[in-house]
Amino acid sequence: MPIATYAGMAVTINDEGFFEDPGQWTEAMAPEIARAQGIDELTEPHWQVIKFMRTEFAEKGTGPTVRVLGKTSGVSVKELYQLFPKGPAKMAAKIAGIPKPRGCI
Amino acid sequence: MSDPIQKVSIIVSKGSLEGVYPALIMANGARAEGIEANLFFTFFGLDVVHRSTVDHIKVATVGNPGLHLATMAGGLPGVSSVMTHYLEKKMEKLDIPPIHEFVEMIADTGAGIYACKASTDLFELTRDDLIEQVMDIITVGEFYAMAAGGEIIFT
């Protein structure tokens, strides 16, 4: 398993860069992961989505799909793609330190 | 590992529920992976972007062996509606949006939605007959220009 260092801490990630153990994630790591994804600065709406991802994962054991994000996170689908151009569910999951959502929708 | 796919152009030529969903799921899934996607609606696929038909796309219950329903039974009045309703209920449980909402969502993901000029001419449709998400009515030549450098999927 590859090891990455975020905010001075070594964490285990998979080949695609997703956290193996979401428990290793801290908020301080998010800006650094985001920069590696091409997001220079995490704005308030970014954080709103990241926190929503963490909450959903904690409750359901899996990250939400883009449709669920658009309906319940308070950020519209259009805006989600502006915030996370390379795929909101996937990018936000990576930045939030949770596994890649596996839904098809 | 092969180079990742950067762009897909998906042609939708069918107007049945089972003919339409795969294309929509692939377009939406492409955008979710950060892949550029364009949808091109042609022939009966135009029903998906036609204001008066988009909310009435049905499962083909005749000539559809995958349904495991006798052709005679499939042809009875109302059978197509019942089967469509049944599938829609199942899809709702799986969080798959109804077709109209799905097209709107796909447009919001930044995918391009286009109608085929030859088909709109054939069915005598104008821009006003089509849902607002349609960006343009384009020719096959314009489609190829748009699809250049990416994958083309015909459904």
Image (spheres, coloured by chain):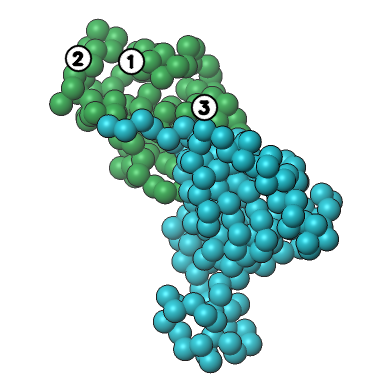
Chain colours: A green, B cyan
Residue A19 seen by the camera: no
The residue type indicated by label 2 comes to Ala
> Mark 3 vs mark 2: which is more N-terminal?
2
The residue under label 3 is: A85
The residue type indicated by label 3 comes to Pro
**Figure quadrant of residue A16:** top left
Q: Residues within 10 Å of mark 1 (few under 14, many from 20)?
A: some
Question: Mark 3 or mark 1: which is in front?
Answer: 3
The residue under label 2 is: A10
The residue type indicated by label 1 comes to Met
Name, please, the residue furthest toward the front: B141
Q: Position of residue B114 (x, y in %)?
A: 68, 46
Q: Tag 3, which secondary structure?
A: loop
Question: Mark 3 or mark 2: which is in front?
Answer: 3
Confirm or deny contact between disc 3 and disc 2 (CB under 8 A).
Answer: no
Specify whether disc 3 shares its chain with disc 1: yes
**On screen, A105 above or below B66?**
above
Q: Residues within 10 Å of mark 3 (few under 14, many from 20)?
A: many
Q: Residue at x 32, y 26 (%)?
A: A97
Q: Chain of mark 3?
A: A
**On screen, A34 above or below B143?**
above
Q: Quadrant of the N terminus of chain B?
A: top left
User: B18 left or right of A59?
Assistant: right
